[in-house]
Image (cartoon, rainbow, N blue to C red):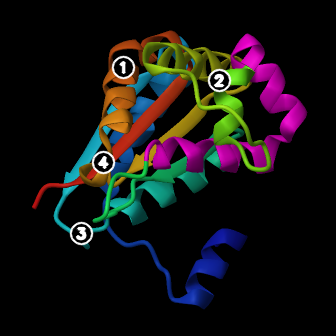
Amino acid sequence: MSDNDLVKRARGEAFVGRRDELARLASAGAEVAGSGRGQLVVIAGDAGVGKSCLVQEFSGRVSADGWTTAAGGCVDVTAGALTYAALIGILRQLDRRLGREVMAELAGAGIGDLAPLLPGLSGGQPGAGGRLLERVLDFLVRLGDVAPALVVVEDLHWADSSTRDLVAFLARNIHAARVLLIVTYRAD
C-alpha cells in the first residue's frame, strides 16, 4: 500500500471502481506523453456521480509520474458570469507551483495578456478575444514542452461564454501541445 493510499484510507477517501474510466484516461495520457500530441477528454455525468473524484485520482497518478497538473472550475454565479474563472484557477495553481519567473518564461511575449489573470498583478485586461486564446495555447505548448501536462476544466455547464470559447478553441488546437485537456460537465 502506498503512502497516498494510506492517507486516503485514514481520511476515509477510498477510491473504488471506475477501473475502465481510469484505463481510458491512462490510455489518453500515454498517447499524449508518447506522441506529443494533445488530446481532449470530456467527462459527463449527473451531479454527484464522481466526475471530480475520477479526475483527482487520475491527476494524482500522472503527477506522481512527473506530469504538470492544474485544474480550475467554472462557477455558478447567478448575478452574472465570472469571466475565465476556470482559466484563472488553472493559471494561479501553476503560478504557485512553478513560480512567477517560470510562468513569465512559459508565457513569453504573451505575459502581458495573461498577467491580469495571475495573482498580485493588476492593471489592464486580459488579451482580447482571439489574442488571449492564442496566448493560452502558446503557453500550453511551452508547458507541455517541459513535461506532459494535465489541464482540467471542471463544471463546464456553469461556464461563461468566454470560457466556452476558450475550451472550443483548445478542443480544435490542443493537438499542438503535449497536454491532456479534461473537461467535466453535468449531463443532468
Q: Is residue 49 left or right of residue 31?
A: left
Q: Earlier in the sequence, mark 2 or mark 1?
A: 2
Which secondary structure type mostly characterizes the magenta part of the structure? helix
Dot 2 and dot 1 residues touching (CB under 8 Å): no
Q: Which residues are magenta?
A: 83-110
Up-down: is 79 above or below 146? below
Under circle 3, the secondary element is: loop
Q: Residues within 10 Å of mark 2 (few under 14, many from 20)?
A: some
Find the distance from the CA under tag 3 to the CA under tag 1.
28 Å
Instruction: Give the amino acid at mark 1.
Output: Phe
Which numbered disc, 4 or 3, marks the residue closer to the eye? 4
Q: CA distance from mark 4 to mark 1?
A: 14 Å
Amino acid type indicated by mark 4:
Leu
Q: Residues within 10 Å of mark 4 (few under 14, many from 20)?
A: many
Q: Is residue 175 above or below residue 81?
A: above
Find out whether the residues at labels 3 and 1 contact each other: C-beta distance under 8 Å: no
Residue appearing at x 40%, y 31% in the figure: 28
In front: label 4 or label 2: 2
Asked whether disc 3 touches disc 2, contact meaning CB atoms under 8 Å apart, the reply is no
Question: Is label 2 in a helix, a strand or a loop?
Answer: helix
Residue beneath the point at 40% across and 13% down? 173
Residue with the mark numbered 1 = 169
**Camera-nearest residue between 48 and 16:** 48
Image quadrant assignment for residue 150: top right
Which quadrant of the structure image shows residue 104? top right
Q: Is residue 40 visible?
A: yes
The label nearer to you, 2 versus 1, is 2
Label annotation for residue 49: 3
